[in-house]
Amino acid sequence: MTTTTVAPPASTKKYPSRPERRAKLEADLETLFYKSVKGLLRGKPMKIAPLEAGAPDRMAILPGGQIHLIELKTETGTVSPIQKLWHERARRLGVNVHVIRGEEELLNWVAARQKDRIS
C-alpha cells in the first residue's frame, strides 16, 4: 500500500494584503472614532454620505453646539488635491475641518476636545 502526502499550499497567507490591511486599519480607526465621540465626548458621531467630491467623510456633533468635519486617514493615507481644496474653502467659512491620521492623532484630537469641555 502506497501512502501519498499532500504538501501544504505554497502560499499560506499569514498577513492580509496591503489593501486588506489598509481597509482593516481604516475600519479600526472609524470604530475608535465612533466610540470616542459617543463615549468620551458625549457627542454624536456620524458617517457622511459622499455627496460632493472632497468633502470629509465623518462629522462629530459635540455638546455646546460644536460641529467638526473629520477626514480619517491611516498613518500613511494621503489627502487628495480635491480634498485639500474642499477643506480649505470650508475653513475659510469658519468650519472646523480636521484631517486625522492614525490612532495617536485621533486620541490627541479627542483629548483636546475633552480639555475644551473642561475649560
Image: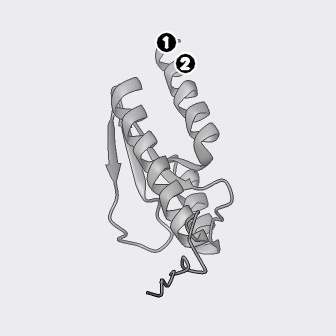
In the image, taking residue 23 as reference, residue 74 lies left or right, namely right
Residue 26: where, in percent of width, then height?
A: 50, 56
Label 1, on which residue?
118
| View extreme (front): residue | 1
Up-down relation of residue 42 to residue 11 (above or below): above
- Circle 1/circle 2 CB separation < 8 Å: yes
In the image, taking residue 6 as reference, residue 61 lies left or right, namely left
Quarter holding residue 36: top left
Residue 45: where, in percent of width, then height?
A: 34, 42
Looking at the image, which residue is at 59% across and 78% down?
Answer: 11
Quarter holding residue 106: top right
| View extreme (bottom): residue | 2
Residue 28: where, in percent of width, then height?
A: 47, 49
Count residues near mark 2 (Cα–Cα under 10 Å), then give few for <14, some for 14-19, many for 20+.
Answer: few
For the residue pair 52 and 33, the one nearer the viewer reads as 33
For residue 80, the mark is: none
Disc 1 marks a residue whose amino acid type is Ile
For the residue pair 112 and 88, the one nearer the viewer reads as 112
Disc 2 marks a residue whose amino acid type is Lys
Count residues near mark 1 (Cα–Cα under 10 Å), then give few for <14, some for 14-19, many for 20+.
Answer: few
Up-down relation of residue 36 to residue 76 (above or below): above
Label 2, on which residue?
115
Distance between mark 1 and mark 2 Cα atoms: 5 Å
